[in-house]
């Protein structure tokens, strides 16, 4: 009875030619992997979607260029839609709403490769006490993000698909 929304990312060094957070060396291998995964898992009705990568706009979680990410998104999305066209596709979650990464994706026409635009909302110990989780999506940064999604993208829904708060230090 649990709905699953897995994300697909990270790979062994032999597949990336570098670290765990690098894009694949061979995009045909990536396509084949995503296709086979979606094909095998489509028998499970509790899998509602796939998210392509995770926090690609942060240097820690994606050590590649925007162009490499766009190709990774395109190949992964195309493969999953070919294997299981009924599944929703999420772009990898963003670490912050105002981001050059989204602008490059939508300006290049790559918003066609995802159905949902997720962001991650973390108010941590290093943020000022006035910055409550309730205020995270308010203000000019969020308005910019929504506007670019609506006017240049395909007006996909925006989800907060990760949320958390650290109690360390306060």
Image: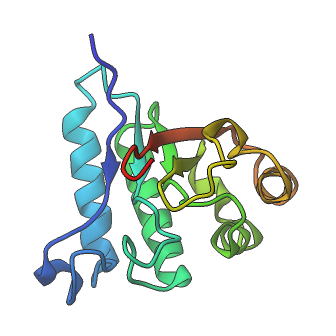
Please state which of residues 67 and 101 is positioned toward the viewer in this rendering. Answer: 101
Residue 55 position (above or below residue 24): above
Q: Residue at x 29, y 55 (%)?
A: 34
Q: Residue at x 45, y 43 (%)?
A: 165
Residue with the most extreme top position: 1
Q: Residue at x 38, y 82 (%)?
A: 63
Q: Give coordinates of residue 142: x percent, y percent.
A: 77, 52
Residue 101 appears at what percent x and percent y? 63, 72
* Viewer-proximal residue among 65 and 133: 133
Above or below, 113 against 23 in this view is: above
Please name the colour scheme applied to the rendered image. Answer: rainbow
Q: Nearer the viewer, residue 18 or 77?
A: 18
Residue drawn at (60%, 42%) of the image: 116
On the image, the x and y values in percent for residue 82 come to 41, 47
Coordinates of residue 70 in the picture (x, y in percent): 53, 73
Q: Quadrant of residue 84?
A: top left
Q: Is residue 117 depicted above or below 64 in this figure?
A: above
**Which quarter of the rendered picture does the N terminus lie within?**
top left
Q: Is residue 166 above or below residue 94?
A: above
State left or right for residue 42 relative to residue 140.
Answer: left
Asked whether, in this view, residue 73 is left or right of residue 5, the answer is right
Residue 48 sits in quarter? top left
Residue at the front extreme, as displayed: 170
Tag count: 0
């Amino acid at each position: 009875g649990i709905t699953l929304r897995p994300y697909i990312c990270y790979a062994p060094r032999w597949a990336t030619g570098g670290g765990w957070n690098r894009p694949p060396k061979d995009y045909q291998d990536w396509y084949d992997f995503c296709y086979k995964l979606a094909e095998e898992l489509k028998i499970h009705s509790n899998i509602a979607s796939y998210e392509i990568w995770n926090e690609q706009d942060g240097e820690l979680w994606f050590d590649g260029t925007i162009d490499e990410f766009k190709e990774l998104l395109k190949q992964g999305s195309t493969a999953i839609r070919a294997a299981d066209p009924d599944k929703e596709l999420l772009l990898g979650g963003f670490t912050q709403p105002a981001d050059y990464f989204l602008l490059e994706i939508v300006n290049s026409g790559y918003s066609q490769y995802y159905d949902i635009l997720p962001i991650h909302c973390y108010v941590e110990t290093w943020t000022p006490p006035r910055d409550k989780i309730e205020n995270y999506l308010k203000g000019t940064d969020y308005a910019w993000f929504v506007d670019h999604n609506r006017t240049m993208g395909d007006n996909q829904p925006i989800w907060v698909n990760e949320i958390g708060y650290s109690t360390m230090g306060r």
